[in-house]
Amino acid sequence: MSGEIVGGWEYVIAVYIISAIVYGGYAYSVLRRDNASRSAIKETKS
Amino acid sequence: MGDVYRIFYIHVPTAWNGLLLLTAAFLCAIMYLLKGDLMWDDRLEASMEAGVVLSALLTIQGSIWARPTWGVWWNWDPRLTTTAILVFAFAGILALRTSLKEPRRRAMVTAVATIVAAADVPLVYFSVRFWNSLHQIQSSPETVSAAFVWPLRVNAIAVLILMAGLIQLRAETVARLREAGSEPPPLDEPVAGGAA
């Protein structure tokens, strides 16, 4: 017993996939809300 | 630790930036109370929103890391408990903001609530030193292997640059909506009074 954890790649992959989804999803959300606010305000002014 | 140590490269930068953004929200709250400029409230909302997203992600990453290393998905350890309180407290403030329509009142309530909730930020950071904790102590050049230091720094800076850009954009959106009225204007009706 070396005390080293054997394997665990499935946890590593899960963390990176979830992180990519959250970072990417948040960036998309910010961009989408920004575009929506620009469009809505432009629409009300015209 | 085996292959699962690779989780550190995303978990630690997420943690550093999450706490940094919530600290930025705290500073924006102080600035609003001192200056009374709603620009600081816009920045507060943007920083807090991003901080809550990172803190929630941090909790999920930590939970996945805990399973192979501690044998459990969750433990009511001081670090984990204070982090969970942090996420719920700041998410609650964001929810509270949606119920307040008048910008000055919303900014004042948010600033005060943010200052109260921010007391948990140093508790999260120092919890591993204040109490016996399953969680290892803070990652720093003194506490992690030399090979970890630069990858952690590079990832942390990359996350910081990404979040700084998103916060700037979000703050502009919040300011635009505030100036047009507190809600996104409907497409088929003109905004009463136009832009402020």
Image (spheres, coloured by chain):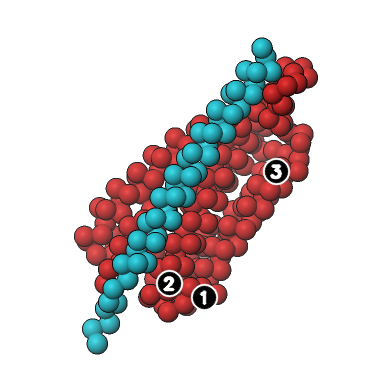
Q: Quadrant of residue B43?
A: top right
The residue depicted at 42 percent of the width and 53 percent of the height is A19
**Which of the chains bears the disc numbered 3?**
B
Residue B66 got which mark?
2
Residue B113 got which mark?
none
Q: Which residue type does callout 2 highlight?
A: Ala
- Residue B15 on image: x %, y %: 44, 56
Label pair 2/1, CB-CB below 8 angstroms: yes
Residue B75 got which mark?
1
Please tell me whether residue B106 is drawn above or below residue A21 in the rendered image: above
The residue depicted at 57 percent of the width and 33 percent of the height is A33
Front position among marks 3 and 2: 2
- Residue B19 on image: x %, y %: 49, 53
Per the image, the residue denoted by label 3 is B97
Circle 2 Cα neighbour tier, 10 Å, few/some/many (<14 / 14–19 / ≥20): some
| Residue that sits furthest to the front in the current view | B188
Q: Which residue type does callout 1 highlight?
A: Asn
